[in-house]
Amino acid sequence: MLNFSFNDLLSYTDWEREKWRAWLLERGDQVLRIKIGEHGDGRLQTLGDLVRHIFSAEKRYVERLSGRPLTDTSTVSAEKIDEVFCFGAESRGQLREFIANFPATQWDVPQEFKIVNSSISVTPRKIIMHVVLHEVRHWAQVATFLRLNGLPGDFHDFLFSPVMGGEIKREQTKA
């Protein structure tokens, strides 16, 4: 059986968040106003909305699992890089604290939740896995939206991250 933990995936998304934050800061807050298309579900209009959504989901799932009221995350600016990534740091801290303190005997006990228009019975382990995979999936969308708007980024693949070690040697191209 493979042996990895939520911490490996959290470390990867921490690395990815920092890469995106630095990349976005180099280009300025206006990049968050890029429209992401008209064929969504109506909740997200801009790149900033999508980034805020990544962090909002993390925060709200921890709140659900903790039995706390859900935060209205629409008050967090989706137009200011520093503000939205500060919110992301807050949500990540709460997720890490939740994982560290959640009783080991409860990870695989299904709980009932109402999410949007659905009722779901799911374990906390599955929800936390969903939170991290949700983030990975949306960062790929961010990269696609930016590329389609003429703003290509660099490698964000797990393979190129420092998580779990390894080494990358870039070969020099001959002119």
Image: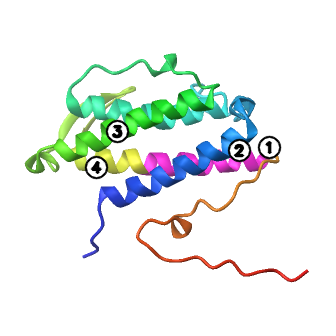
Please name the residue shown 29% across and 74% down the image. Answer: 2
Please name the residue shown 75% across and 50% down the image. Answer: 147
Q: What amino acid is labelled 2 in the image?
A: Phe
Alpha carbon separation for disc pair 3 and 2: 28 Å
Q: What amino acid is labelled 1 in the image?
A: Asn
Q: Relative to residue 6, is residue 142 drawn left or right?
A: right
| Residue that badge 2 annotates | 145
Numbered range of the magenta stretch:
133-149
Q: Are marks 2 and 1 in contact (CB under 8 Å)?
A: yes
Q: What amino acid is labelled 4 in the image?
A: Lys
| Residue that badge 4 annotates | 126
Alpha carbon separation for disc pair 2 and 1: 6 Å
Q: Earlier in the sequence, mark 3 or mark 2?
A: 3
Q: Earlier in the sequence, mark 1 or mark 4?
A: 4
Q: Is residue 74 above or below residue 137?
A: above
Q: What crowding class fits label 2: few (fewer than 14 Cα within 10 Å), some (14-19), or many (20 or more)?
A: some
Q: Earlier in the sequence, mark 4 or mark 3?
A: 3
Alpha carbon separation for disc pair 4 and 3: 19 Å
| Residue that badge 3 annotates | 93
**Which mark is nearer the camera, 3 or 2?**
3
Q: What crowding class fits label 4: few (fewer than 14 Cα within 10 Å), some (14-19), or many (20 or more)?
A: few
